[in-house]
Amino acid sequence: MDYVIVGTGPAGVIAAETLRRVDPSGAVTLVGNEPEPPYSRMAIPYLLAEDVGEEGTHLRHGADHYADRNITIRRDEVSSVATDGRSITLASGEVLGCGRLLLATGSTASRPPVPGMDLPGVENCWTLEDARKIAGATQKGSRVILMGAGFIGCIVLEALVARGVELTIVEMEDRMLPRMMDHTGGEMIKRWCESKGVKVMTSTQVTALEQEGAALKVSFNNTDAMVADAVVCATGVKPNIGFLDGSGIACDMGILVDHTLQTNVAGVYAAGDVAQGPELLTGAREIHAIQPTASEHGRIAAMNMAGQATQYGGSLSMNVLNTLGLVSSSFGQWMGVDGGEEVQVTDNDRFKYLRLCFKDDVIVGALGLGLTQHVGVIRGLIQTRTKLGPWKDRLMKDPHRVMEAYLVRTQGSSFGY
């Protein structure tokens, strides 16, 4: 069997290694459009913070890792996919045939339609080349404006602070981490960042950028303009699906897949940030662009490509983030569900917050700040959809007893009950 995998991120690499393990005789080709060895985008902030060198971002180490496993890496762009999914055309004009095809093309950083976004000194933080440019443009004391305070933006801000820059964050929503935190949590993270010397402007939009000598003049919708030595844009990403126009492969926000991660075209699969697949709690098809999901997608897609039927249970929205020493976590349907109940406990002075959301006697979502000891337990209760029974009412009175609830309902411990 000829296997072709488009995309050299975690989903693609794990799929290639899985295929080699379960089908030693098959031909495995990885196609990637960047000149570097396969690497993790989540490691880029560590590179910017100078905690690792470029090699530290690589997904696998050793010059012969892929060759030793008879995995071929092709550096080219895919321009189109045949309607039967049996071949792809590369930007070079070459056509590659494939018995099974995996699309793991990930996402591309997007920029808002603001005048001046294409000026020198405005960078994304999504690729190794982006990181090289940011490192070359910033040093201790550099004035940097970071556009976007979502998950990616908050990872980048940690790296920029480590570089010693004078940092201002601009977020158009009314709080930091608007897709991961409610207003209480987002405001708490904002206060924490400000206590560390970072300026944070929420409910604020950049309206224009202009060259001002060697610097950039940045204008806003609701406050005076500022001058920056560099602007880093972290306002979101979009799945790479444009090359599928005319292929017949069904797409929505991403590539639509089923519980085997197969698309509507037989023999064509999708995995990682580009795949819109079943969500664990609702069954609705969603994109969860996180590395654990991408890794699991890659493994399961490969098993099915090789003919070993494997069901994917569904992805779960889950994020754990360290922002300048404040750990935040977000799982599942943290915004609550219709007809459900929720409980919150807040300690503003100590930057601690816990919110649990229930559907009947099952936890379906949770938020946490400044609390690390129960993160794995909460995630486990949500993923296993554990029925809490009488412990639901006890958690409504004191959500900090979640470890007790977990041990009683999953391990049979009694705690006096």
Image: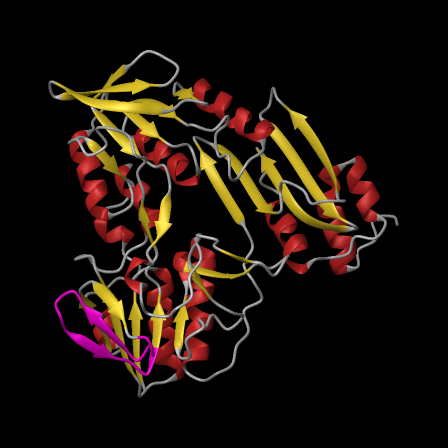
What residue occupies the far front of the structure in this picture?
A: 246
Is residue 89 within the magenta segment?
Answer: yes
Is residue 376 within the magenta segment?
Answer: no
Q: Residue at x 19, y 22 (%)?
A: 210
- Does residue 206 appear in this view? yes
Q: Position of residue 366 (x, y in %)?
A: 64, 43
Q: How is the image coloured?
A: secondary structure
User: 392 or 212: nearer the eye?
Assistant: 212
Q: Position of residue 213 (x, y in %)?
A: 11, 18
Q: Tell me which corner region of the image, top left, top right, bottom left or bottom right, holds residue 342.
A: top right
What residue occupies the far right of the structure in this picture?
A: 417
Q: Residue at x 68, y 53 (%)?
A: 381
Q: Position of residue 80 (x, y in %)?
A: 25, 67
Q: Residue at x 46, y 18 (%)?
A: 195
The relative height of residue 57 versus residue 228 in the rendered view (above or below) is below
Q: State the count of labels.
A: 0
From the image, which quarter does the N terminus lie in? bottom left
Residue 407 relative to residue 333: left or right: right
User: 59 or 294: nearer the eye?
Assistant: 294
Q: Tell me which corner region of the image, top left, top right, bottom left or bottom right, holds residue 196.
A: top left
Tell me which segment is drawn in magenta: 83-100
